[in-house]
């Protein structure tokens, strides 16, 4: 019955009702997902033990989900709601397109499944989207709870570190800093006095050299050397002053440059601190994404049918994605195991890479030392070969003196 226009119909009203019974009982699956997210929320945020949950809360979870799934299936079976529904047998009116009593002033032209549109949304899609929204809310609360716990741990750890640092400063850090500051001020005063003294000595040397050069012209070469010595000492003193100024400037630059590594360290610290909460967030996002992926197009398809329209590609996505909910949930559930395996493999590869680099570094350093030693040895041999012998020097001197004699 109701198979008019259906390609290759097979079965009876009894087989159609049996298929629709189990499809309707499938509403327990998203309800169980909501119960699972609620279980983790009670365990993490409210610190309820697993024993208490298993004895007091878990029986209610099983009872409510199973009772609702089987109860709605039996109600629809008794009211004759299970009929042909395009893709499969489910809650629908028969014949297709008949007037239902809720929309026709209490009168109906349907043989079976009167007011099926109300039962569709009351028994399936309303609980479905309530479970989806409830799972999203509980997952967000779970992530927030883990995040707050991490922040509390970081806060108390920072307080402990600061208190220990202040205790150390009270013991010996203050006296050492005062002594160092005093030594620094005395050192700067001494250096300024030495620079002024060296400048006065340089001017005296210049004046004495000029007087001696005017009185005794034969000392011009010596005066030039004295000028060179004086200019060298002046340049040395100027370099000392410049180095002192550069040290102060470099300290300022180093303090400004240290802000970038500090910012990077803060980012890395935040990542390490909120590592668990980020893992919870992404795992919750995967669960919710499976919900949306499997049931979004099914809900759109039923809304279009409620409006009297049918879109083929939406029906195909509905038929393909809904049966994949169990497989996708299994993949999401096993993702942490895959992630741990991937991290282990990555660490093993990194350790092997470091080992190879260390081995190559040892080989390269040994080869560099051997090359340097060979170069040094060859250089020494060349110097010995280039150095003239004593006999050759005597013969050369005798040849130079022979014309004079």
Image (cartoon, rainbow, N blue to C red):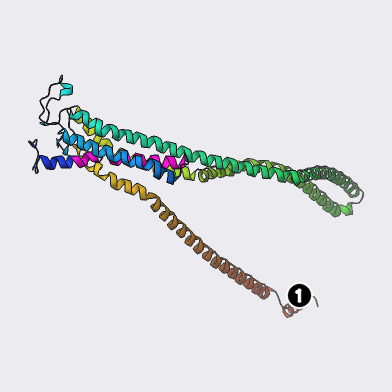
Which stretch appears magenta?
21-46
Q: Say few, some or many: other residues with alpha carbon within 10 Å of mark 1 (under 14 / 14 to 19 / 20 or more).
A: few
Q: Quadrant of the C terminus?
A: bottom right
Residue at point 36%, 35% (across, down): 134
- Left or right, 132 with respect to 239, comes to left
The residue lying at 64 percent from left, 44 percent from top is: 161
Can residue 78 be seen here? The reply is yes
Residue 115: quarter of image: top left
Q: Nearer the viewer, residue 15 or 141?
A: 15
Q: Camera-side residue: 301 or 375?
A: 301
Residue 145 image point, x, y percent: 48, 38
Question: Measuring 82% from the left and 52% from the top, which residue is drawn there?
Answer: 229
Hey, which quadrant is residue 32 in on the image?
top left
Using the rendered image of the protein, determine whether residue 287 is visible from the camera's viewpoint: no
Does residue 264 appear left or right of residue 248 in this picture? left
In magenta segment, residue 6: no
Residue 338: image x %, image y %?
38, 53
Determine the image quadrant of residue 294.
top left
Which residue lies most toward the right here? 215
């Amino acid at each position: 019955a109701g198979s008019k226009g259906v390609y290759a119909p097979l079965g009876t009203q009894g087989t159609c009702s049996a298929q629709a019974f189990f499809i309707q009982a499938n509403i327990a699956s998203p309800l169980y997902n909501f119960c699972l997210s609620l279980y983790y929320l009670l365990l993490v945020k409210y610190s309820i033990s697993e024993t208490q949950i298993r004895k007091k809360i878990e029986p209610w979870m099983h009872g409510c989900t199973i009772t609702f799934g089987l109860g709605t299936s039996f109600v629809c079976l008794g009211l004759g709601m299970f009929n042909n529904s395009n893709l499969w047998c489910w809650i629908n009116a028969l014949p297709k397109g008949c007037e239902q009593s809720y929309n026709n002033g209490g009168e109906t032209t349907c043989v079976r499944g009167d007011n099926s549109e109300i039962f569709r949304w009351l028994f399936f899609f309303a609980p479905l989207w309530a479970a989806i929204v409830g799972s999203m809310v509980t997952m967000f609360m779970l992530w927030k709870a883990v995040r707050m716990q991490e922040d509390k741990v970081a806060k108390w750890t920072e307080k402990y570190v600061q208190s220990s640092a202040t205790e150390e400063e009270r013991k010996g850090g203050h006296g050492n800093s005062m002594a160092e500051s005093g030594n620094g001020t005395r050192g700067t005063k001494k250096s300024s006095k030495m620079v002024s003294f060296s400048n006065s000595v340089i001017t005296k040397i210049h004046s004495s050299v000029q007087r001696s050069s005017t009185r005794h012209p034969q000392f011009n070469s010596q005066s030039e050397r004295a000028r060179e010595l004086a200019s060298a000492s002046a340049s040395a003193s100027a370099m000392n002053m410049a180095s002192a100024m550069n040290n102060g400037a470099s300290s300022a630059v180093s303090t400004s440059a240290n802000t970038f590594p500090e910012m990077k360290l803060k980012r890395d610290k935040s990542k390490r601190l909120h590592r668990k909460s980020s893992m919870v967030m992404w795992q919750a996002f995967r669960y919710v994404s499976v919900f949306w992926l499997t049931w979004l197009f099914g809900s759109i398809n039923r809304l279009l049918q409620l409006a009297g329209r049918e879109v083929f590609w939406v029906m195909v996505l509905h038929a393909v994605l809904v049966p994949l909910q169990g497989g996708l949930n299994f993949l999401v559930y096993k993702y942490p195991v895959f992630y741990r395996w991937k991290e282990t493999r990555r660490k093993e590869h990194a350790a092997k890479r470091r080992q190879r680099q260390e081995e190559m570094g040892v080989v390269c350093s040994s080869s560099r030392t051997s090359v340097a030693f060979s170069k040094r040895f060859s250089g020494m041999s060349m110097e010995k070969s280039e150095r003239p012998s004593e006999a050759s020097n005597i013969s050369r001197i005798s040849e130079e003196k022979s014309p004079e004699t």
